[in-house]
Each structure stands twice: as structure tokens, then as C-alpha cells.
Amino acid sequence: MIDGDIASAFGHGPQGTVHSYDPVQQTLVVDWDTGTRQVLAADAGLIRLTSSWVSAAGTGLLWDEVHSAAYAAGATAGRAAADQWCQDNLGERASRNVKAVARTVMRAFADDDLESLDRLPLYEPVRSAFVEDVSIHDVAALTVVPEVEQWSPLSGDQVDAVADSYRNGYDNALLYHLALQCSRAASPTGDGRDLSYLHPDTLRVGRYGVFSGEWYLTDDEGPDRYRVGFVGVLEGFWNGWAVFACDRTVVEQIVADRAADREADRDSGLSPAEQDRELDQVWGRTYFDGDVLVVDQRIMQGDPQAIERTTARVDGRWSVRSMNLSWDAVDPANCDRIIGDLPAAGAEQAW
């Protein structure tokens, strides 16, 4: 049987039977009355863990459970760090373009180049910090283990192994939640949903797609990005440009954008009448007159007949052809936002 100083190092006094003893290694194999077997190194009454299935001193847990607890503690800290980073960089506190930041992070994930992101709160474990500071306290809190000094019997390698479990939990949780939040922030819908079924490569006449034009391009580096894309059903092509039909919400937004761009081009050095004439020459006029869409390009084209009035079709959709704009079908993932009701996957064939 065995008890006394060696057993007391575990914080209780169970009894057990010595199964074997190695005088060279100075180790004991003990079968405790609780049903567990442990390999012990008895040195000045202390117990050192030498096997993965040995109970961890002072915790009442098996060694694998200590690793699990350390991983869980790290995951909790990693999730908290991710949430804080997202509040600072993607939330209301953000001082930069949120979608641009999110896309930068997603590109780094795709390229496996997280080292290029100097602001991510990645965890770099330091053994002394783990033992003396946050990690040991987190493990204790999660396992309802009192903060005692029984961790001292662990060897340096074992402490490092537990620290690695904590780090792995931290980094995995951090990166998972960062990827999740960034994919949502970068998404034009704000929820990170997969819109690949609306990719231009799959577009056919009668199918839903997302459309935009070069006047909506952003100044971002890299692939073309559009400030906005519009949901519509492809009707065909005219002079190489897409012609699509859409609901009134989409048409109203296009009309509002045209009016805003027109006003932004106003020359304050001219009289109001001169300003209007110059804008009519460059932009024309596009507006709603009740339920009638008016596209007036008479001054722009120098043609008194160049005015069109259109209404919604029987199906409630409007054609954008009368606006004489050069539309392209675009990848919805390349839009900062999307106007219009997106069809569900599998329901993109309108007619």
C-alpha cells in the first residue's frame, strides 16, 4: 500500500498498491484504490507526471482532461479577443472602411498569409506567463480547481504542452470567429450567405442575376468592386450590354443614384439656368412621374423626340433599357451592397 507524503501531494489521501518499482528511474507504478493507475516519480515527496493518463496534481482531473480544460480556456479567451477586434475594426468604433478591412482579412485567410496582418491579436504563448498569469487561472476557473501550487510538480515539457493546448484553443477560436465575422462584413447582404449561384458565368436569359456599371466602381485595389449591384432578370443584350428587368425598388434606387450624380456634377460658377442646361447635356433627366418612368435625353442628344415614358409590365417588372446605360452582369461577391430581392438558390430561373 502507499499513502502519506506522496498521496498528500494530490491534495487528498487515497491509498493504493505499488504495482512495480524501477530503482534506476526512481519511479513507482501505483494502482490507487479509486481504480486508476499512475506512474509516479517520488522525489522529496513530490509527484511528477510521467504518463498521459496520470492524474494532474492538485486538480482531480486526468491529464487529458487538463489539456481539454486548457484548450477550452484558450478558446474562450480567443473568442473574446475576436469579438473585441471586430468591435474595434468592423463595428461602430471602426475608423476605416469596414468592408475593405474585412476583405483584406479574408484575402489573407485565402492566401494563408496571416503574418501580413499586423493588427490581429494572435496569441504567442510564453511559459512563465502561462504558469504565473492568465492561462493557469483560466484553467482553474473552468475546472473549478482552486489556485494552488500543486502545478509545481509538472515538468517543463508538461507545462509547455498544456500551454500549447491553451494556445491552440485560443488561435482556433480567434481565427474561426474572425473569419465568420469578416465574411459577414464583406458580404453585400451582411450575413455572409453564398451567392455563387448568381455568378455571371451561370447567367442565362430568363434567370436572375446582379447587374452594375462602371460608374459604380470603387477605388479599391485589386479586382473590380462595385458600390452597389442590382437584382434583375436578364432579358438579353443590346450593343453588348446587359438588359434586365427589375422591380420598382431597384428602378427607384437607380433613378435616385442618377439624380445624385447629376447634382454632384453641378458647377456653382454658373447661373442656375446654365447649370441645368449643362447637366441636361451631360446627364439628361431621369425621374418618375407618378407610375411613369421618364427618361428625357432631348438636350443630350439634340433630338426633340428623345424622350421615353415607360410603365411597369404586366408582371410588375420594369425594363432598364430606356435609361441607355451600359450594364454588366457582375459577381455579387464583388458588390458592397445589393438592391433588390435575391431569389433563393434553385429559384433563380424566373421564366
Image: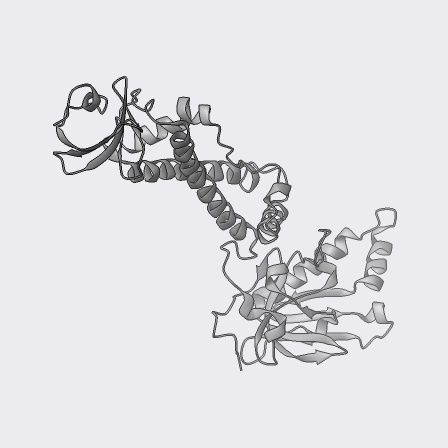
**Residue drawn at x 63%, y 44% as measured from the top left:** 97
Answer with left or right where residue 165 lies relative to residue 118: left
Answer with left or right where residue 161 lies relative to residue 186: left
Answer with left or right where residue 63 lies relative to residue 228: left
Q: Nearer the viewer, residue 258 or 216?
A: 216
The residue most toward the top is 44
Asked where in the image residue 45 lies, by quadrant, the reply is top left
> Is residue 144 visible from the viewing direction of this image?
no
Residue 263, given in percent of the width and then of the height, sits at 75, 53
**Residue drawn at x 45%, y 23% as measured from the top left:** 128
Residue 249, given in percent of the width and then of the height, sits at 57, 64
Asked where in the image residue 332 lies, by quadrant, the reply is bottom right
Q: Nearer the viewer, residue 28 or 258?
A: 28
**Residue drawn at x 58%, y 38% as measured from the top left:** 94
Q: Nearer the viewer, residue 31 or 239?
A: 31
Q: How is the image coloured?
A: one colour
**Residue drawn at x 51%, y 49% as measured from the top left:** 179
Q: Is residue 323 above or below residue 38?
A: below
> Quadrant of the image for the N terminus?
top left
Residue 37, given in percent of the width and then of the height, sits at 20, 37
> Is residue 350 visible from the viewing direction of this image?
yes
Q: Is residue 126 above or below residue 274?
A: above
Q: Is residue 179 above or below residue 124?
A: below
User: Could you tell me how many numbered marks the image carries?
Assistant: 0
Residue 63, given in percent of the width and then of the height, sits at 30, 36
Answer with left or right where residue 129 lies relative to residue 292: left
